């Protein structure tokens, strides 16, 4: 098992307590032995390896950040959660996203937005991965305007709610047992959250085909036609989009950690290739311009890692703000784009062959760059914070 990543030039992993680092190394071993041998085959087919769900269940790493849930109590640090996202993405961004949607977006929505009864009803089975979660917010006709432009509606009818509308790009939705659906209450115009159970009448997820990023993730377009959801399945702590924003603030930081994982995965591949590939009678790792690309990549990784360590500390202290996670997401995903391009450049023509892995990271990076708020939207969040002036439309 790797004791330290070659990309961890400043030994950031040493910041983890011994027990948490053991969990990180457990994930590292799992991703190397169980996930890596499968990913290129499934990426090429554009299918999700469902046999991994049972193996993730045996791994026992879901629910770590949530006090009172999961196998390891008490709750672990945000630094471990971030490094866990990094570690999984370092091997494969798609599989890491499957786990992140379940363990992050879905579970955190219930943990932070549900009442105690709802947490106790759903989180133990989700922590055990007996039930898989999904998170349905983005819509076919909306993206960055979701706060004020959500078209999916919820209408109360006695002790039930009737949902109508559509969602798009929803990871895990084709097979998830529990889908967190966000809808606008037609009576008070506020966004509310609902836990929609698998096979609910009127709930139809259809897999999106022909993707060239995150091909392993089963993203779905969902139609909701008079879907009836009991009041008991409405997240009781969500009463407006402001409450939803609290969830997105936390998960946006997790996406920045994923971007770091992509950088590390691409850098490791490029470094290994440069040492082995020979041109003009010597390894290309001896060429100055190749070393320049590798050092710039390592610099991006090291700077981004330092930013994310401090973001995790702010989260643990409970004092982090929207602009903190937005700056991390905007900055780290931009640096990620540079690193994957430099890595593919080192591979030359061999970089476009799936067998060499780098193209998987190159294309998957584009999905991470776009979701959980575009670079432009996150830039404007930070811009408002530092100038006091809103530049939003």
Image: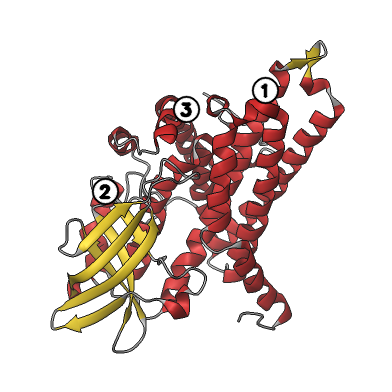
Q: Residue at x 62, y 79 (%)?
A: 392
Residue behind mark 1: 273
Q: Residue at x 75, y 34 (%)?
A: 294
Left-right relation of 166 to 18: left
Nearest to the observer: residue 163 or residue 51: 163
Q: Identify the mark at residue 118; answer none if there is no mark.
A: none
Circle 3 residues within 10 Å: few <14, some 14–19, many ≥20: some
Nearer the observer: mark 2 or 3; the answer is 2
Measured in 3D between alpha carbons, the distance from the residue under mark 2 to the one under mark 3, in whole angstroms, is 25 Å
Q: Eyeballing the image, is 337 above or below 286?
A: below
In x, y percent, where is residue 98? 39, 46
Nearest to the observer: residue 342 or residue 259: 342
Q: Residue at x 45, y 37 (%)?
A: 23
Q: Residue at x 56, y 26 (%)?
A: 2
Left-right relation of 159 to 175: left
Residue behind mark 2: 175
In x, y percent, where is residue 104? 41, 55
Left-right relation of 30 to 87: left
- Secondary structure found at label 1: helix
Residue 243: tell me if it is visible: yes
Q: Which numbered disc flags the more N-terminal residue, 2 or 3?
A: 3
Q: Which numbered disc flags the more N-terminal residue, 1 or 2?
A: 2
In which quarter of the view is residue 338 placed?
top right
Nearer the observer: mark 1 or 3; the answer is 1
- Secondary structure found at label 2: loop
Q: Eyeballing the image, is 359 above or below 223?
A: above
In x, y percent, where is residue 290? 79, 29
- Are dots 2 and 3 in contact, CB under 8 Å? no
Residue behind mark 3: 32
Nearest to the observer: residue 81 or residue 224: 224
């Amino acid at each position: 098992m790797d004791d330290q990543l070659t990309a961890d030039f400043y030994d950031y992993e040493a910041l983890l307590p011994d027990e948490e680092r053991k969990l990180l190394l457990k994930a590292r071993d799992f991703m190397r032995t169980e996930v890596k041998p499968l990913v290129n085959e499934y990426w090429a087919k554009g299918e999700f390896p469902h046999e991994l769900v049972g193996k993730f269940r045996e791994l026992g790493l879901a629910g770590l950040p949530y006090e009172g849930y999961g196998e390891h109590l008490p709750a672990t640090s945000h630094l471990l959660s971030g490094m866990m996202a990094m570690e999984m993405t370092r091997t494969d961004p798609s599989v890491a996203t499957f786990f992140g949607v379940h363990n992050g977006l879905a579970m955190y929505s219930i943990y932070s937005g549900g009442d105690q009864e709802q947490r106790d009803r759903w989180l133990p089975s989700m922590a055990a991965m007996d039930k898989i979660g999904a998170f349905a917010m983005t819509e076919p006709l909306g993206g960055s305007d979701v706060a004020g432009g959500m078209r999916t509606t919820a209408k109360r009818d006695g002790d039930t709610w009737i949902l109508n509308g559509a969602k798009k790009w929803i990871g895990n939705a084709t097979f998830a047992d529990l889908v967190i659906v966000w809808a606008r209450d037609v009576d008070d115009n506020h966004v509310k959250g609902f836990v929609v159970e698998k096979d609910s009448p009127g709930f139809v997820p259809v897999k999106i085909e022909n993707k060239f990023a995150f091909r392993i993730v089963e993203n779905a377009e969902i139609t909701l036609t008079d879907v009836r959801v009991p009041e008991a399945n409405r997240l009781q702590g969500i009463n407006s989009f402001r409450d939803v924003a609290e969830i997105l603030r936390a998960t946006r930081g997790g996406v920045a950690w994923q971007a770091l994982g992509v950088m590390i995965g691409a850098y490791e591949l490029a470094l290994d290739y440069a040492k082995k590939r020979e041109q003009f009678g010597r390894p290309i790792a001896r060429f100055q311009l190749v070393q320049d690309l590798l050092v710039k990549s390592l610099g991006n990784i090291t700077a981004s890692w330092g930013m994310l360590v401090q973001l995790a500390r702010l989260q643990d202290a409970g004092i982090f703000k929207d602009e903190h996670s937005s700056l991390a997401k905007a900055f780290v995903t931009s640096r990620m784009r540079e690193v994957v391009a430099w890595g593919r450049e080192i591979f030359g023509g061999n970089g476009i062959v799936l067998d060499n892995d780098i193209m998987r990271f190159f294309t998957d990076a584009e999905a991470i760059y776009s979701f959980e708020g575009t670079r432009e939207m996150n830039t404007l969040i930070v811009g408002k914070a530092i100038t006091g002036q809103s530049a939003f439309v």
